[in-house]
Amino acid sequence: MKKYNLSIFILITLYSLLTSASAQWLETTIPVGHNPLALAWNSTNNKIYCANYGFGYRIYDSTVTVIDGETNQVIATIIVGTCPRALLYNPINNKIYCANSGEYPNLDSTVTVISGTTDSVITTIRVGASPFAFTYNSINNKIYCANSYSYNMTVIDGASDSVITTLPSGGEAMVYNTSNNKVYSPNYFGDSVSVIDGATNQLIATIPMFYPRAFSYNPINNEVYCAGGSNVAVIDGISNQVVATIPVGVYPYALVLNSTNNKIYCANAASDNITIIDGSTNQIITTTTVGDVPWALVFNPTNNKVYCACAAIDSVTVIDGLTNQVIATLGVGYQPQAFTYNPLQNRIYVGNYHGSSISVIRDSIISGIEENHQPLTADRFLLEVYPNPAKTLTAIRYSLPAESKVSLQLYDISGRLVKTLVNEQKKQGNYSATLNSQTLPTGVYFLSLETEEQRIIKRLVVVK
């Protein structure tokens, strides 16, 4: 430790210990349209999009509500197709795709493409019957739309918004393998998972799986997790072989990856608990009891928390990612069913299906090392990092309330200095820097922003 910065090491140790002792609080409730069923965050413009399913209401109640990610104000309401139920953000072209599932039996199934800049409709794409889910191919800029009632998949070009092809595989969930450029989709009646080559759009494998209904991709181990029946199957991303079958609770309905600790969480809707799986061994670590009908999951990489929407008791259970302990239960709106995460303001957005509202949850660290409750402004000392986890480039923004000598440095988890990004005198104002995360080994790092008066530390997770 003699060569390491001892004060930084102590702060990092305190940070790691105290992230579990954070304050979870309901910041606000935002009224939206009827039956919010899906949420998505626009990382380019810091906006949240909410698909209002509007089932049983007139067609013009099928809308997408747009919310400013900084102020939590509704800034637009967009008319889309009938019964919108899934959203996807395309970061390359700054577009939002909305799957309109139509009303049974006269299905009018389309995908509405929305400009992330103007929040206006660009075009409408005809797809298969009752589209339920999306996934995005970042390598080839393709959007995959799973059509539940026609049991097929529409492949859309992200640049032209034209249909490339339709493949005979589709259901209510999808996932993309970034390492091998593959798409995974369920075949409900065939009790199997289809594996599609992302470059050629060809079916390359069919994997037996009973009633697959949820997916999660683990880039750390290059494995795909698929929940079905009362099990989670682990699929090797290279060989397309099932390498483990993990028994979980009854009716597993949602999966999420904790990229900080390499854990997979499985929400078991009918047994009111979450199975926590070690991503390196695929062994069950523990089973954590949560509220009635755990329906949706989201991971907060900034503070290492997992959030579970308990639809039957109108609450969100918060689990510490390190200790696997429930640290908070927050009352939200009526029947929460959807999440999205805004890393810039460290907010969790919860769609309350029968409450026609969005609950906004904030997570703040009370250690004094980090406190980020306000937008980035030049009159406050703040540090923001995105994306986190990072794979290629990491954007760093910081603000200085007064002129000072500034040091922005990256440390590894042991407190060893990895890189100095800034070391100079700067005037009051807002600044930005870029870190090439691709050159760093997978792991947990800490960014330290220090002036003559103050210091902030932010955790950064690097994945491959």
Image (cartoon, rainbow, N blue to C red):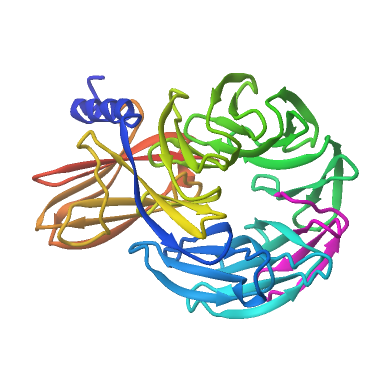
Task: Tell me if residue 53 can be seen.
Answer: yes
Q: Nearer the viewer, residue 49 or 123?
A: 49
The vertical placement of 436 against 329, above or below, is below
Left/right placement of residue 318 relative to residue 228 reads left
Q: Quadrant of the N terminus?
A: top left
The structure residue drawn at horizontal position 86% and vertical position 43%, both measured from the top left corner, is: 205
Q: Quadrant of the C terminus?
A: top right
- Relative image position of residue 35 (x, y in whole percent): 58, 60
| Tag count | 0
The structure residue drawn at horizontal position 80% and vertical position 56%, both measured from the top left corner, is: 148
Q: Which residues are magenta?
A: 145-174
The vertical placement of 437 against 154, above or below, is above
The structure residue drawn at horizontal position 13% and vertical position 57%, both measured from the top left corner, is: 401
Q: Nearer the viewer, residue 40 or 282?
A: 40
Left/right placement of residue 425 relative to residue 143 reads left
- Relative image position of residue 346 (x, y in whole percent): 37, 49
- Relative image position of residue 369 (x, y in whole percent): 22, 37
Q: Is residue 54 magenta?
A: no
